[in-house]
Structure formats: C-alpha cells, structure tokens
Amino acid sequence: DSGVTQTPKHLITATGQRVTLRCSPRSGDLSVYWYQQSLDQGLQFLIQYYNGEERAKGNILERFSAQQFPDLHSELNLSSLELGDSALYFCASSSYGYTFGSGTRLTVV
Amino acid sequence: QQPVQSPQAVILREGEDAVINCSSSKALYSVHWYRQKHGEAPVFLMILLKGGEQKGHEKISASFNEKKQQSSLYLTASQLSYSGTYFCGTEGSGNTGKLIFGQGTTLQVKP
C-alpha cells in the first residue's frame, strides 16, 4: 500500500455517461496530481491541486473537471465520455518524489 | 514541453549495464526517475535537483546536467527485477511540483 488511495480500481461505462474518480493523498501531503495513461502511452498531466486550490493545468479536456476538498481528497469528474477516454487514470501526491495510487482503469464501451 | 527519452527500448542480459537518457528543451528545476511494471503504478526511484549532483543507491544511479537540461539513468549489473518501463519526469524552473513525463523507455532483462 503506497498510502495514496484511489477508487474505484475498475470502471466500465457507456459513451455519453459521467463518472467520478476519487483519490486520497498520503497523510500530510497537500498536493494531488492527476495523470492519464492510455494503452502503451506515457503519463499525460491533467491537473494539480494544492491544499484545495488549483495550481497547474495540463491538456485537460473541458469535459473533465476536478476539485480538492477540505480533507484533501480529490475527485476527477469525466463527463460526456467517449471511447478515446478509455485509459488508466493515476493520482499522485508528493513530499519527496511522487507516490502514485494504484490507478483507476476506465473502459468506455 | 515533453522531455525526450532515449533509447525507446533496451534488451539486456542479466549482469549487463544500461543507460537511459532524458533531454528537455526547457530550463529545469529537477528531474525525477520512475519505474513502472506492467499493470502497476509507477514507482519513484530518485530525484535530482539542479546542481549536477549524482544520486543513486546500490546499482542504480543518475546524473543531471542542468546546463544541457539532460539527465541520465545508469543501471549496472542489471537484474531480472529491473525489467519495466522507465520514465523521467521533469519539473520546470517555476518549481510548482508539476512533472511532465517522457514517453518512457522499456527495459527487458533476460536471464
């Protein structure tokens, strides 16, 4: 257990639907980062939150949004899902280097 | 801008050495290295801050040349457990903590 908790581990949903991915950072870490990893692809940065505030944004689609709550857990909302959104979604928190959660595998059918 | 890793793939025999390079076109504050095994999350290996220091433990080490914006990961006397995909992640001079990852280098160590 890395200390970063992601739920759910797997998600299968239909095109056009909306899903929410959840991440709890390691105790004491204030930052949460979200990354998308498509099949055999690298890690694409989506968005970063620090202590409840958005700090940096990557190539995140307008259909995607995120937030970090007062207890520091974060949620990534994906709406109007398309087949191409199928991927592994990782969150990470950092103190010295990133600690990644185990990921959520999203399959859009 | 995404850093460029080379080579894209390496196949080694146990005991052989490998070098993986990471190059950025932007000024960097730090470079991180991670290893990801198939179906698992990336695992942190080491971080190098600007200053050119070399870090490592056991048989995995790395260097960072901030003037050239390049980092190299050195794996010596490779073991089967070293197999996986290695990613460098670069943090820009803004020091926000955000990492941009390279496309990865797949390393396969054979007996």
Image (cartoon, coloured by chain):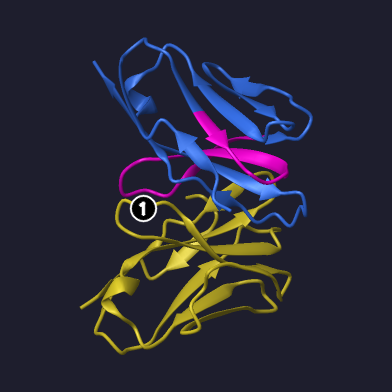
| Up-down relation of residue B49 to residue A26 (above or below) | above
Image: A55 above or below A19: above
- Residues A37 and A30: in front is A37
Q: Position of residue A48 (x, y in %)?
A: 63, 66
Q: Is residue B63 left or right of residue B95?
A: left
Residue A92 placement, left or right of B14: right
Circle 1: element type: loop
Q: The magenta stretch spans which residues?
A: B21-47
Mark 1 Cα-neighbour bin, 10 Å: few <14, some 14–19, many ≥20:
few
Indicate left or right for A31 with B13 as reference.
Answer: right
Spot occupied by residue A92 in the image (x, y as percentages of width and height): 56, 57
The residue shown at (70%, 41%) is B30
Number of dots carrying numbers: 1
Q: Is residue B58 visible?
A: yes
Is B17 rendered above or below residue B9?
A: above
User: What quarter of the picture does the C terminus of chain A occupy?
Assistant: bottom left
Of all chains, the one bearing label 1 is A
Give the chain coloured yellow. Answer: A
Residue type (three-letter) at the residue carrying disc 1:
Gln
Principal secondary structure, stretch drawn in magenta: strand
What residue is at 37 percent from the left and 11 percent from the top?
Answer: B16
Name above or below for residue A91 compared with residue A95: below
Percent of width and height locating residue A55: 71, 69
Residue B3 image offset from top left, x and y in percent: 55, 44
Q: In this view, does B101 lie to the left or right of A54?
A: left
Tell me, yes or no, whether the highlighted magenta stretch contains residue B42.
yes
Q: Name the residue under label 1.
A: A41
Q: Which chain is blue?
A: B
Q: Is residue A108 magenta?
A: no
Task: Please name the residue shown 35% across and 40% down the image.
Answer: B37
